[in-house]
Amino acid sequence: MAVREDKKEIIIENAVGVFAERGYYKATTAMVAKAAGVTQPYVFHFFENKEELFKAVIDRAFSRIYDTFAQVNAPADQLIETMGHAFEQIIQTHRDEVLMVMQAHAISESGIREHVSSMFLKIFESLTLKFENAGIPNARETASQFIGNGLLITLAEVLKLPQLIAGIDNC
Amino acid sequence: MAVREDKKEIIIENAVGVFAERGYYKATTAMVAKAAGVTQPYVFHFFENKEELFKAVIDRAFSRIYDTFAQVNAPADQLIETMGHAFEQIIQTHRDEVLMVMQAHAISESGIREHVSSMFLKIFESLTLKFENAGIPNARETASQFIGNGLLITLAEVLKLPQLIAGIDNC
DNA sequence: TATTATTTATTGATTGATAAATAAATAAAC
DNA sequence: GTTTATTTATTTATCAATCAATAAATAATA
């Protein structure tokens, strides 16, 4: 039982890198299996299909980002800056997860898209609430801009264009 | 000769919608052909392969965005706002093209990624120069934020989450 | 007739997924 | 405590579908 959970865990952990590097469609279940050190069909003992595997992987990525933001605690006048730093840190420590999240919207599988959509909304609402509670004016707009900034940073990472964010403050 | 060019044109025009809706990998050459009213193998008489077809299509999308920004002319204190409106208008008139551009970074084909990367850089540099010429301080940062905002708007479109941009000014 | 435009037929490779077989571990029985 | 039975873990073999791409054939046009 513990072993079985371990293997599932190992598959998820190794799938992140494959999905991040190759994208959902170019990432094959064989590659994920190889990265995890198991055979390709064995992946389907833990996940009903490729889509479910992906969902499991991206759930983790979203949760990490969500939780990180939730845990940030700073005075109102430093909140946004601190949140920015927190995001920068996730990019460094869990680069693949962030890249996955960024690419996820381009997956046309309707099941995945709905999943991704609801997760982005969750993060947005969580950010808005946090900014509101801190007494920041235009909390919604601030949350929007914060996400837009995150998208830009990640795009710069994916396209290897550091110029795109050279002028941004928290770099 | 003219006919041949016409058909190529027709294929490009119809491919936009297919690529935008399904994404590069889920869009098949058969679908593109059907949308254009030709047979699937005939597409390869105009484009060496699927990748070249995609490049031709996205070149047009990028060019339209690039040209639109280049043509904007407004006093410095209204420049950004006017540019924002211009972008909003492209989304309405050429929604598929914008969606394509947004999704393009998630294509792991190295040829396409390099292509997309250079196009984003071009737009960024063009924006920066425009802001500089208008005497806007922190032109680079402003250009970055402008692109980040565009990414956010497009993401909201793709994920059908208008909430994400409800608080943004130019909506 | 010659050239251009376009289609039909076909293939070779990829890949998600299934099924059957085997190995390993655990428990039960003697 | 060793053998047997049973479940759990994992692999090998294979399939069926999808799709980009090629080649050969045909139709249209000049």
Image: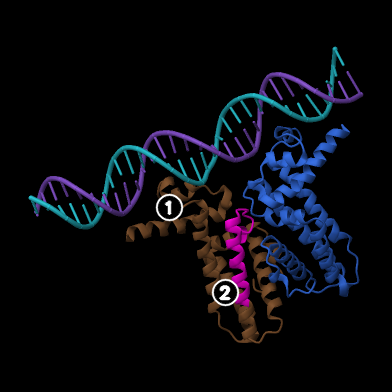
Chain colours: A brown, B blue, C cyan, D purple
Q: Is residue A65 left or right of residue B154?
A: left
Kind of element beneath mark 2: helix
Give the amino acid type for the residue marked by disc 2 in the picture.
Ala
Find out whether residue A53 is within the magenta segment. Answer: no
Place of residue A31 in the rendered image (x, y in percent of width and height, measured from the top left): 49, 47
- Residue shown at 78%/59% (left/top)? B123
Q: Is residue A10 left or right of residue B135?
A: left
For this rendering, which residue is in front, A110 or B52? Answer: A110
> How far apart, in angstroms, are the residues tagged by discs 1 and 2?
29 Å
Place of residue B128 in the rendered image (x, y in percent of width and height, measured from the top left): 80, 65
Q: Quadrant of the C terminus of chain B?
A: bottom right
Relative height, residue B150 to residue A27 (above, below): below
Q: Which residue is mark 1?
A: A36
Magenta portion: prevailing SS class: helix
Place of residue A99 in the rendered image (x, y in percent of width and height, measured from the top left): 58, 60
Task: Specify whether residue A159 is in view.
Answer: yes
Q: Is residue B32 left or right of residue C11?
A: right
- Residue shown at 84%/71% (left/top)? B81
**Range drawn in magenta:** A102-127
Give the amino acid type for the residue marked by disc 1 in the picture.
Ala
* Numbered badge on residue A86: 2
Q: Chain of mark 2?
A: A
Relative height, residue A90 to residue A157 (above, below): below
Q: Quadrant of residue B157?
A: bottom right
Q: Nearer the viewer, mark 1 or mark 2?
A: 1
Relative height, residue A57 to residue A143 (above, below): above
For this rendering, which residue is in front, B132 or B2? Answer: B2
Kind of element beneath mark 1: helix
Find out whether residue A124 is within the magenta segment. Answer: yes
For this rendering, which residue is in front, A148 or A51? Answer: A51
First of labels 1, 2 by sequence position:
1
Q: Quadrant of the N terminus of chain B?
A: top right
